[in-house]
Amino acid sequence: EDAILSADSGSAANWFARDLKLGRGHMASLSGTLATMGPGVPYAIAAKFCHPHRPAVALVGDGAMQMNGMAELITAKKYYQEWDDPRLVVLVLNNRDLNQVTWEQRALQGDPMNPMTQRIPDVRYADFAELIGLAGVRIEQPEDIGDAWRQAFEADRPFVIDAVCDPNVPPLPPHIRVDQARALVSALRKGDPEARGVITQSFKEKILEFLPGR
C-alpha cells in the first residue's frame, strides 16, 4: 500500500493511466508532456533514495528497457543493500514492438505497422537481472501473473517481471474520434502485417467494456 510508482513513456503510460487506481498515500511519476523515453527505472531508483523504507515499482515498455533500463538495473544492483527495504520491482511489458509509435501511425496517419522500424529484439530481461545478481521471472501466461508479483514483493533484492504481451492490444482511449477510426481502417487496408491480430484484439477490448466491473 505504500509503494511508489513510476511509468515510462510509450504504451506503458497508456496502461498506467487506464488501469491503475492510486490510493491514499501513493506516490506516482511520469515523464510529463515531453514523453521522454527512459525515466521509468531511474525514477524508481530515485524514489528508493528518497524513501528507502518504501517499495518502488516501475512500469516500462521493452523499448525503454533496451534504451537505458537495463543499464539502470546495474545502478540498482550497486545500491540496493543500502536501502532499508530492498524491494524495487520493474515490470517490463515485452511486446517486441515500439508500440506507442506503431499505434500512433495507425490511428493518426493511417499508416500500417512498419516492421523495419517498429520491431525490436525479444530480450530475456529477467535473465539479465539474474546475471547481474538481482532476481526476476518471465511470464507468458495470464495465470502466472499473481505468482510473479508475489515473488517480486517477497524478494530480498530488486526484481524484474518480464511480461510477454501482445502488441496488437490497442492502447487507445475509450472514446475514439471518427478520423482516428478511419485512419486505423486505412492502415489495415494498406497491408498492416498485424491486421488480423489488431482486429481480434480490438473486438475483445470493446466486448470487455460491457462486462461488469470494467
Image: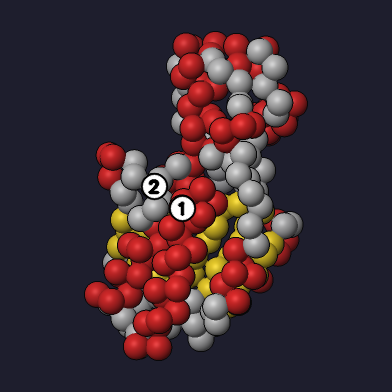
Counting residues from the N terminus, which is met first, the one under dot 2 or under dot 1?
A: 2
Q: What amino acid is found at the position of numbered circle 1 in the picture?
A: Met
Classify mark 2: residues with Cα within 10 Å, few (<14), some (14-19) or many (20+).
some
Query: Which amino acid, by three-letter code, is at mark 2?
Result: Met
Give the x, y percent position of residue 64: 46, 51
Residue found at the far left of this picture: 50
* Residue 51, visible in the rendered structure: yes
Which residue does the image show at 35% across and 70% down from the upper left? 45
Q: Nearer the viewer, residue 190 or 16?
A: 190
Give the farthest residue toward the front: 116
| Residues at circles 2 and 1 in contact by the CB criterion of under 8 Å | yes
Q: Where is the C terminus found, in terms of image quarters?
A: top right
Determine whether 190 is above or below 199 in the image: above
Residue wearing tag 2: 37
Q: Is residue 143 above or below residue 205?
A: below
Q: Which residue, given by chain and number where applicable, does mark 1 sit on?
A: 67
Q: Would residue 204 appear left or right of 14 to someone viewing this image?
A: right
User: How far is mark 2 from mark 1, CA to CA?
Assistant: 8 Å
Q: Nearer the viewer, residue 127 or 162?
A: 127
Nearest to the observer: residue 25 or residue 86: 86
Q: Residues within 10 Å of mark 1 (few under 14, many from 20)?
A: few
Q: Is residue 202 left or right of residue 9?
A: right
Task: Tell me where residue 212 appears, x and y as whole percent.
Answer: 60, 42
Picture layout, residue 80 above or below residue 169: below
Q: Quadrant of residue 191?
A: top right
Q: Secondary structure at mark 1?
A: helix
Q: Position of residue 96 (x, y in %)?
A: 63, 45
Residue in the picture at 33% in, 51% down: 30
State which mark lies toward you, 2 or 1.
Answer: 1
Residue ID at (57%, 35%): 118
